[in-house]
Amino acid sequence: MANDSKSKLLSSAFEEFAKNGFLGASTRDIAAKANINISSILYYFGGKKGIYTAALKKIVDTVNDLTAEFTSRYQEVIERKDKTEAAAFLKEMMQRFVSIVCSKEISDNVKKIFLSEYSSPSDEFNILYSELIRPVHDRMANLLNLASSNKISLRDCYFYIIMLFSQVFVFASREEFICKLMDWNGYDKKSEKRLSDYIDAQIDFILSSFPLKSIKK
């Protein structure tokens, strides 16, 4: 019963935080939507900040579970030091994240909270950054560095990976507008493939363009 109440409150919190953000969210509304006494939020989570923290940790756990296969394969790819394999694996990872961020694998409420934190970080953003975003950036930057045979500095690799992810997040937050602009019939497997192809093409372009004398350190 206790776990059931806690789960209902957290589910309600996702809906409330997605709709109103952390500052605008009401613990009274969270409790009412879950049909549970408001005192339970204090008991289980320690208050509004605590249940928001729990929601962010749930996002981390969800995405990490969905990408566990890549996390386990990553070290093997790095140790083999094959630049072609590294490039292919980087593209595969990016395609997986496109699918997670843009499809229905995670709920709209989860996406709204994540995108809100990414574009306008709260004091709790470090939970997402340290436990999810930074580890992913680390792995992908290392793969890009290996794929370039170290021609692209690791520092520059971080920048390019951040830019690639930013494009995915922009698409997720402006999906309807972009699909209309591109004459895509909404978001489906075909448009997901097109988006992944654009990302792949950019990775190929980055790898083929270095070293660039115009980039000053």
Image: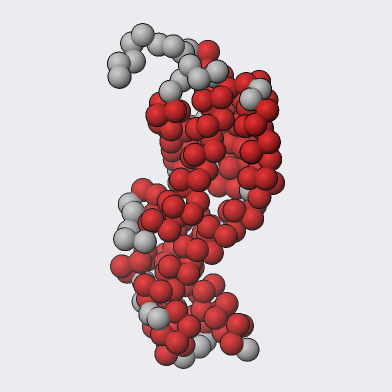
Q: Quadrant of the N terminus?
A: bottom right
Residue 217 versus residue 50 in the image, above or below: above
Where is residue 143 shown, x and y percent of the image?
56, 30
- Image point (50%, 51%), residue name: 132
Q: Quadrant of residue 80?
A: top right
Where is residue 182 shown, x and y percent of the image?
52, 30
85 lies left or right of 57:
right
- Image point (42%, 69%), residue name: 52
Residue 78 versus residue 133 in the image, above or below: above
Where is residue 141 shown, x and y percent of the image?
50, 32
23 lies left or right of 57:
left
Where is residue 13 shown, x and y percent of the image?
47, 72
Q: Quadrant of residue 89?
A: top right
Q: Which of 12 and 191 is in front in this view?
A: 12
The outermost residue toward the front is 79
Q: Nearer the viewer, residue 164 or 128?
A: 128
- Image point (44%, 74%), residue name: 51
Q: Nearer the viewer, residue 60 or 191?
A: 60
- Image point (35%, 66%), residue name: 22
Q: In which quarter of the image is the C terminus?
A: top left
62 lies left or right of 138:
right
Q: In which quarter of the image is residue 106?
A: bottom right
Residue 157 versus residue 54 in the image, above or below: above
Res 95 visible: no
Res 11 visible: yes
